[in-house]
Amino acid sequence: MSGWQRVAPLFVCGWFASLCIGCGSDDATTPEAKGPKPFKVMTYNVLCSFCKGDEYDPWDDRQGYFRDIFSRHDADLYGLQELSFGSEVDQMLGLVDGFSSVYYAAADSNFTYPDASILYRTERFELEDSGEFWLSPTPDVPSSIGFAERQVPRLVVWAKLFDKQSDASLVFASTHVDNNSPSQALSAPLILERLEPFAAEAPLVLLGDFNSKPDTEAYGILTTSEGFHLVNTQGLADTWEVDTNQEPAPDYDLDDRIDHIFVAPDSAAWSVSHWAVDVHEYGPNQRYASDHFPMAATLLAGER
């Protein structure tokens, strides 16, 4: 028998073996296809650190409550309201791993105003651009007011984020609308006007404390205006729940909501697999972590 005759069977076997190695599961050899992927968002007005009252525990005590809320819901994007100082944003970042923040910081001083802030998961999202506009007759003037006599400065903070999993951009915005009438009704058309151009470029999510129940004029402007408008994710959700540790579970009236998670229907083919409001009590006195309940939604921005 020649040398080749002795080696040939081994060569053939090795060739087939190499084919078999290459014939493993698709998961082992094929990278995950790009395209829309679900992501989870949360809005939460955390109740300012210096807001006093016997109904709520001190700010430092509430840090552990916030950590539990963030851990249980494990959102990819957070819109937070009523943070008062940049150091408090840092505190929030210390409660979640792998996040960065977006909030207003003056270009010509050390002044910060994180009343509406954004936290985003850096493993998934990359910041492309960010900015803000103020809810006033002069929206480009920082800290401007003018929609009500006792109005404090309110704003919308936005971030354009690149979603590495979906290989597409997303616009995520957080707001805290003033509670002094008629600020809400005057802010609503301004919000639509300023956000509409973003929705033409990428899927748009707006969430926050709107100080507007579903039966108010401001809410109607946001959700029923002709042309560009917003849709509440709770109404789109396949399932929704009151997430609570209380027994029996408390009643929750959807008509009493002033916090909302909106999407722009013109910006994507949206689907919402789940929506939840978190009604947990904490501490020895069984108190809520804030005077607002956090809300979370799992979203998918399908192609238009």
Image (tube, rainbow, N blue to C red):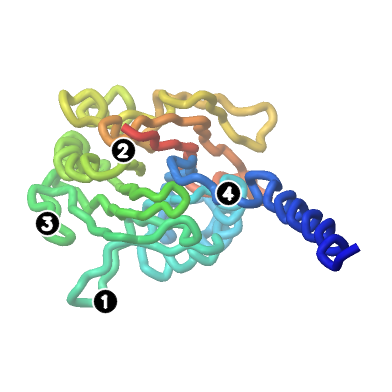
Q: Which mark is residue 140?
A: 3
Quarter holding the N terminus? bottom right
State the residue in front, 23 or 15.
15
Name the front one of labels 4 and 1. Answer: 4
Residue drawn where x is 27% and y is 59% of the image: 130
> According to the image, label 1 marks what residue?
110
Residue 20 image position (x, y, % from top left):
74, 49
Does residue 125 lie above or below 42 as drawn? below
Under mark 4, the amino acid is Thr
Q: Which residue is mark 2?
A: 211
Which-is-in-front pick, marks 2 and 1? 1
Residue 181 in view of the camera: no
Q: CA distance from mark 2 to mark 1?
A: 29 Å
Using residue 128 as the reference point, say whether residue 241 is left or right of it.
right
Disc 3 to disc 4, C-alpha distance = 48 Å
Nearest the viewer among 207 and 300 is 300
Q: Mark 4–mark 2 contact, CB under 8 Å?
A: no
Q: Earlier in the sequence, mark 4 or mark 1?
A: 4
Secondary element at image label 3? loop
CA–CA distance in space, label 4 to label 1: 49 Å
Residue found at x 12% / y 52%: 139
Q: Which mark is residue 30?
A: 4
Circle nearer the viewer, 3 or 2: 3
Kindly state the secondary structure of the residue where label 2 is placed. Answer: loop
Q: Position of residue 131 (x, y in %)?
A: 23, 58
> Residue 242's image quarter?
top right
Going from N to C along the chain, the mark reached first, 2 or 1, is 1
The amino acid type found where label 1 is placed reads: Asn
Q: Is residue 245 visible?
A: yes
Residue contact at pointers 3 and 4, CB within 8 angstroms: no
Report helix, strand or loop for mark 1.
Answer: loop
Q: CA distance from mark 4 to mark 2?
A: 48 Å
